[in-house]
Image (tube, rainbow, N blue to C red):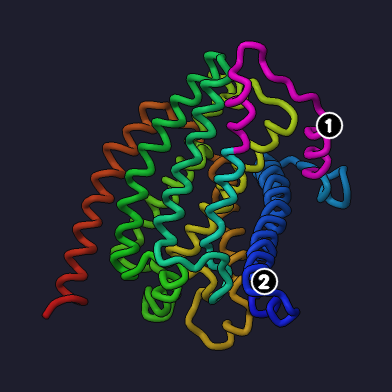
Amino acid sequence: MTAFFQSLGMPYEWAWFVATICGILLIVVPLLVAVAYAILADRKIWAAMAMRRGPNVVGPFGLLQSFADGLKVFLQETIIPSAANKGLFVIAPIVTFTVALLAWAVIPFNSGAILADINVGLLYVLAISSLGVYGVVIAGWSSNSKYPFFSAMRASAQMISYEVSIGFILICVVLWAGTFNLNEIVIAQKGHGLGFVNGFAFNVLLFPMWVMFLISSLAETARAPFDLTEAESELVAGYQTEYSSMSFALYWLGEYANVLLMCALNATLFFGGWLPPVEWAPLYVIPGWIWLFAKIAFFFFVFSWVKATVPRFRYDQLMRLGWKVFLPVSLLFVVLVSGYLMLTRYSV
């Protein structure tokens, strides 16, 4: 894209700058639209599973419901509690929303269709997603209210617990692919799984890692059955209790952007990303970004399905699963995967 703007007579510096801005907009604008319809899809899936209609009034089939909700929130008054730390109170939702968007910079939508094709893309995603907890903790503390504070403490413990096991799961993927670059991780999945299925998920060693990664994704995004940071029966609305108007909407958008990111990571790391599901030449006629979006939609359906059907865990069950089950199992698989590779791929 930089070369295109240079052909229009721009100097390299300006061409690079404009190309980068255009690349960011090409990701952010569709992502925000996708978030709006993800919220609608979530509500429609829950309604279908509860044998209800869901949103069906605003626009054809309720397609404009999310935009109507956004307009309603935008027109509400922003209320800042008098005892709150006003600076941090305002910054917290901005941090959460911004961090949710930053990680998308290294997600490959097709071969070469990536904003920042860096060699440590997976480390970048892990680092950026770890920053999301700051928006939650700052919100809980700055509200100067006990229920948001309890929620912030839960969130920090929950995210730290599951990020440890996610780190070991990703080590297994990196060992098998031999790279931290997400685009190359996708390419490394060609023909894995029964010899013709594109994806690590059907690898005997990495399939359990995908199951753990999917469950950890639910915990990392505080989705049911791990939505203890927003347990309405205990904490009103958790760390968002004191927020209103656009501040509340930023948390709303950030949450769904993170959910879509985790769906994209499940597809990219374990299900072949932008590759077709099967190594068959005619399937490559379909653009890679369509395959990726289809896989993201499938995982989003799984996320909604779980929320509609699985009851919420107790907090002690949440912690026990993270520290006593996922951590030792993920460590065991790091040893198994590295040992297998040393015996087969790297043996002299």
Vertical side of 123 occupied by 50: above or below: above
Between 39 and 11, the residue placed more toward the observer is: 11
x, y percentage for residue 212? 37, 50
Say few, some or many: other residues with alpha carbon within 10 Å of mark 1 (under 14 / 14 to 19 / 20 or more). Answer: few
Vertical side of 114 occupied by 196: above or below: below
Q: Give the magenta range.
A: 65-94
The residue shown at (42%, 27%) is 314
Quadrant of the frame with the N terminus? bottom right
Q: So how many labels did they put on this image?
A: 2
x, y percentage for residue 68? 83, 40
Q: Say what amino acid the circle numbered 2 marks.
A: Ala
Question: Are the residues flagged by discs 2 and 1 in contact, CB closer than 8 Å?
Answer: no
Would residue 74 be counted in the magenta stretch? yes
Quarter of the view holding residue 216: top left
Say few, some or many: other residues with alpha carbon within 10 Å of mark 2 (under 14 / 14 to 19 / 20 or more). Answer: many
Q: Gap between marks 2 and 1, in whole Å? A: 38 Å
Mark drawn on residue 15: 2
The residue shown at (40%, 52%) is 213
Would residue 141 be counted in the magenta stretch? no
Q: Is residue 48 visible?
A: no
Vertical side of 208 occupied by 240: above or below: above
Mark drawn on residue 232: none
The residue shown at (55%, 59%) is 105
The residue mark sitting in front, 2 or 1, is 2
